[in-house]
Structures are given as structure tokens and as C-alpha cells.
Image (cartoon, helix red, strand yellow):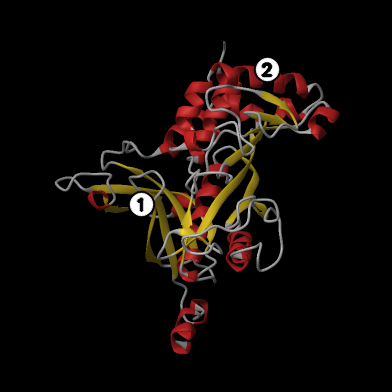
Amino acid sequence: MSLLQDLLSINLSDTTEKIIAEYIWIGGSGMDLRSKARTLPGPVSDPSRLPKWNYDGSSTGQATGDDSEVILCPQAIFRDPFRRGKNILVMCDAYTPAGQPIPTNKRFAAEKIFSHPDVVAEEPWYGIEQEYTLLQKDVNWPLGWPIGGFPGPQGPYYCGAGADKAFGRDIVNSHYKACLYAGINISGINGEVMPGQWEFQVGPAVGISAGDELWVARYILERITEIAGVVLSFDPKPIKGDWNGAGAHTNYSTKSMRSDGGFDVIKKAIEKLELRHKEHIAAYGEGNERRLTGHHETADINKFSWGVANRGASVRIGRDTEKAGKGYFEDRRPASNMDPYVVTSMIAETTILLKP
């Protein structure tokens, strides 16, 4: 095993200019991340200089066997924390050979919204709080829980420390550092309310980059849990009963909201979100109805509400924002398995482009 580790740690820059690029894309379920690697003649820092590639879409649920080729278009580059050196991770989106985005390519539609002049002028910022659950591999039961049984009730686990409260911290800290190495603007981590559940935050990120960074952060976490022999779950309610679910609270502001008088802009934006509540809920993640019950720090899925410092509301405004009269708000409705391309672009579309 030590020889294997030595081989994995080889520094390619000692002997060759060639680098390895890991092309990443989203599979047919909308949540399954796929990737494969190719050798490039030298370092690349601009996605437009990377070659397009292809894959067998019939094996990912994105094409039929008689016309299976799907084209990968590189969109964003990150440093590779696994191979290191000048090797890179490449976030891609997917197209037909004729150049049309395939149905699961949500980035294409998001980019159109973020490229709209009115949206560009407002410089939308996002901070996404990605919650997730670590599961024991062979039993799909939360890490640290007795197999077939339950730990003590919630209370001591949130931001807790100790062998009986925090389960999987090495995975979480490895992910934190790997994201920083990759160039992802990860802004923090914490243990969550349910034992075995954690959160990382990405942002502030502007426009389409929020989606790119969150997807690559998810990919890195998948790879680290693979190494650790632990299963990663983005299920919004992994355990039934009196246990918190998992969300992806999305913090949001525009240039107008961050400027003097921004509090009124925020309130008008929230009014627009209320008008499209059903549309947003439909796009905010599968199984979210199991999480948004009005309990466990959530709002009822069927009722839109907002409030200052209220974690039981659909949309929460922080005390600092209220005090300053400007700032950001938090959309607490998105589930942990939401597509960040969909959620970020939809919030921008509703709050900036919608004319009631």
C-alpha cells in the first residue's frame, strides 16, 4: 500500500509538461456527478482553451443507445486537490452533437438569465449553505448512530465537539481544505442539528459561478467520502421523525439591496418571491415536502412567510440587515438536493426580471 501511495503522490511537473484534466458533469438523475480524465499537453487556465469532449449518454440516462454521444463543454476550471501540481478539475455542461443543450443541462438556461443586462447590472451575490448527511456504507444509517438504533435526542450535536457528538469531522475538515486548495470560495463549515449531519457554505459568489463552485464542492466531497468509505447523502429528510432535515439555504443580495435604501428593495423582492412561491417550490428539490413541514426550523411548504431572524419562515432577514437598512436575505426553502444553477438563476429572474 505504501508503494501505491507513493505512485499516487508522483509530482508530474518533475518529468513532464503534461497535465491531467478531470472533466466533471451532472448525470441523468440531476444529482449524480460523473467524471473522467484526459491528458493535456500543458497547463490551461482558460476554459475556452480546453477541448470539448464526449461521453456515452446511454450509460448515464441522458441519451439512447442508437444515438448515445453527448458533448462536454468546459465551463470552469479549478485546481485538483487529489492530483495536485498543475492538474485541474473542469466543470462542464452537456450538449447534443448538433449543439443543443440536453434536457438535464440546467446551466445553459441559468447562464442566459445571468447574462441579461438587467441582471448583470445588479451583480447578484449568493451564499449557499449546503447541508448533507454522512452514512455508514453498508447499512445506510447515519455515521455515529448505533446500527438499527438511535442516539440521544437533538440538542448537543449542533456545532458540538466530542466523540459522542461529532461524527466524521476528519472528512469535513479534509473537504474544507480541499475546496480552498481548489479555488472554491468556501466560507465555513459546521456540525448540524442532527448527528452525522454537517454543513459547508459557498460564497459570496457572483452569478453563474455560485452554481459552478457548489457543484465542484459537491464533487470533491463525493471523492473524499469515497476514500473514507462513507456514503454521502443529500436527501432532504434522511431520517423520519423528530430529526432535522437537510436544506441548502440560499443567501442573496443585489447591488440595489446592498446600497442605501436596500431594505425597501429587499421587501419588494420578497413580495415577488411570494407571487411565485409554487413555481419556486417545484424547482427547489425532490422530496422537499418531507422537510418543509413547519417544524424543525422550516416553514410549511404550502404557505409563504417571511420575517426578521425567523428560522421558521420561508425567507429570513437577518438582524444586521434590518439594523443597517440594507444587505441580504436568506431563502430557506431550497432542499439539500436542489440544483444550484436552477435556484440561483430563478431567484435572480423573479426578483430582478419579473414585472408583476
Residue 68 spot, x, y in % from top left: 21, 48
Q: Amino acid at mark 1?
A: Lys
Q: CA distance from mark 2 to mark 1?
A: 42 Å
The residue shown at (54%, 24%) is: 349
Binning the other alpha carbons within 10 Å of mark 2 as few (below 14), some (14 to 19) or many (20 upward) gives few
Tell me: 258 left or right of 168: right
Residue 103 spot, x, y in % from top left: 33, 36
Q: In the depicted view, which residue is nearer to us: 218 or 132?
A: 132
The residue shown at (26%, 49%) is: 57
Q: Is residue 115 visible?
A: no
Figure quadrant of residue 352: top right
Which label sits in the foreground, 2 or 1?
Answer: 2
The numbered dot on residue 168 is none
According to the picture, the residue beneath numbered tag 2 turns out to be: 268
User: Image height check: is 98 above or below 155?
Assistant: above
The residue shown at (53%, 22%) is: 277
Circle 2 SS class: helix
Tell me: 153 left or right of 284: right
Q: Is residue 192 visible?
A: yes
Q: In the depicted view, which residue is nearer to us: 328 or 38?
A: 328
Circle 1 SS class: loop
Residue 149 spot, x, y in % from top left: 51, 59
Q: Amino acid at mark 2?
A: Lys
Residue farthest along the bottom direction in this orientation: 3
The residue shown at (70%, 67%) is: 162
Residue farthest along the right direction in this orientation: 323
Residue 328 spot, x, y in % from top left: 72, 32
According to the picture, the residue beneath numbered tag 1 turns out to be: 52
